[in-house]
Image: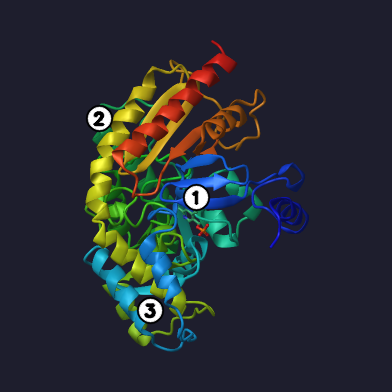
Amino acid sequence: MLTNDQIKKANQHYVLQPWSKQAKRNPKIITDSEGIYFWDENNKKFYDMNAQLVYANLGHKHPKIIEAFNQFKELEISAPGFASESKAKLAQKIVDLAPNNMAKVYFTTAGAEANEQALKMAKAITGGYKIFSRYRSYHGSTLGAGNLTGESRRLGSEPSPPGFVKFDMPYLYREYQNFEDEKALSAQYLTRLERQITSEGPDTIAALVIETIPGSNGVLLPPDGYIKGIEKLCRRYNIMMICDEVMSGFGRSGEWFACDHYDVQPDMITFAKGVTGGYLPLGGVILSKELSTYYDDNVFLSGATYSGHTLVCEIGNVAIESYEDMDLIKHVKQMEIVMNERLEKLRVYKYVGDVRNKGLFGAVELVKNKQTKEPLIEYGTAQGNDKQGYMRAFSQLLLDEGFYTFAHESHVLVTPPLTITAVEINAAMDLFENALVRFEEQFPK
Ligand code: PLP
């Protein structure tokens, strides 16, 4: 067995770490974990308030999953061309949980790959080649998903292949135009989007892709009527509506899928992360009845070695059973209130511009100035223009307190395992407040 020191050295030497300059990395090692907690190599305890990367929805070391792993003594492996019980059962279960119009699942190994496949299907079925997606969205880092992405993390995938078109989304807190109410704001944006669709030529457009609730760009809750309006435009112009629920799916927002909140029936839903509680890599595309029927007589021109891998699907089934055993959707709805109360209390702090949550999908937006809403870090620049080191400092203060999470530009996510209790939310948010107090001392106004 390697010592912690040896692990760190080998990691630094041989592993290419994502999204970073390699020389500056010094990642922690998780040496133990349980429920919503993990411990690092110095035996420091952390509240996992990002559920790792918003996937450990069932918490760490979930007993039912660990037990399932221990039972795999006679596991059959079978290539995607074979039928298997675990794959068939999981696909049926996911279709049952998804909106009523859904009928089939294509399994992938990750969220980005799910989005890639959804794009291919939309292009094949409609004959269009343009893909609309939004600024302030993240859809993955492969070439297609990277170009769907509408923020700084797309830069590594540029220049984009032809046909990727971006549109703007309403941003309730940071809206620069006046609006009477949420519906009026939605109407403004939908009118502009319709103009963009007609200008681009509806026949050339295969799909419109949205994160139903954009996650890593700060849980940007859609205003009233907006998602329904998107669906109407897609129907009016025969464009596929694809909801990327890689982060928002599987209970995160207090429903199985975030689109359940908005009374819509997308043509495709992409998912990953929470489907296995993060215990094994699995993603996929859920297709509507109409699309599934299309493939009855048309060849589906895609495939991948590990699509529907037996072991991975088995763990997917156990994970969903665990969600149901614990009645997690109901639990998330109850915890939404507790988290909301604690987030709202943060508004008294000088650097807190906005707080938002739906279910246990929460974020805090930090600003330099509460009147002008000037963000701590200018949009689109990642941490690039954080000359004063605001976000680096705040992230470090959170870690010092034992609050582990993800920060992007001026947003900090509050996205714990869905199993978190009210007591644990309160204890974790005390740590967040401690970090804010120390931040105000470090950067006095
Ligand atoms: N889509 C959304 C909304 C995501 O949040 C992510 C990852 O965070 C992805 C797609 C990409 O998923 P993966 O990292 O599994 O490729």
Residue displayed at 22% across by 50% down: 330
The answer to whether residue 176 shows anywhere in this view is no
Residue type, mark 3 in image: Lys
Q: In this view of the protein, can residue 359 be seen by the observer?
A: yes
- Where does the N terminus fall, quadrant-wise? bottom right
Q: CA distance from mark 2 to mark 3?
A: 46 Å
N-term-proximal mark, 2 vs 1: 1
Q: Amino acid at mark 2?
A: Asp
Of the numbered discs in the image, which one, if any, rests on residue 345?
none
Q: What residue is shown with label 2?
A: 181
> Residue 432: percent from the left, percent from the top?
45, 29
> What label sits on residue 87 in the rendered view?
3
Q: Which residue is mark 1?
A: 52
What is the secondary structure assignment of the residue under circle 3? helix
> Looking at the picture, which amino acid does disc 1 mark?
Gln
Query: Under tag 1, what secondary structure?
Result: helix
**Is the C-beta separation of discs 2 and 3 under 8 Å?**
no
| Mark 1 Cα shell of 10 Å, populated few (<14), some (14-19), many (≥20) | many
**Residue 423 on image: x %, y %:** 32, 36
Q: Mark 3 against mark 1, which lies toward the viewer?
A: 1
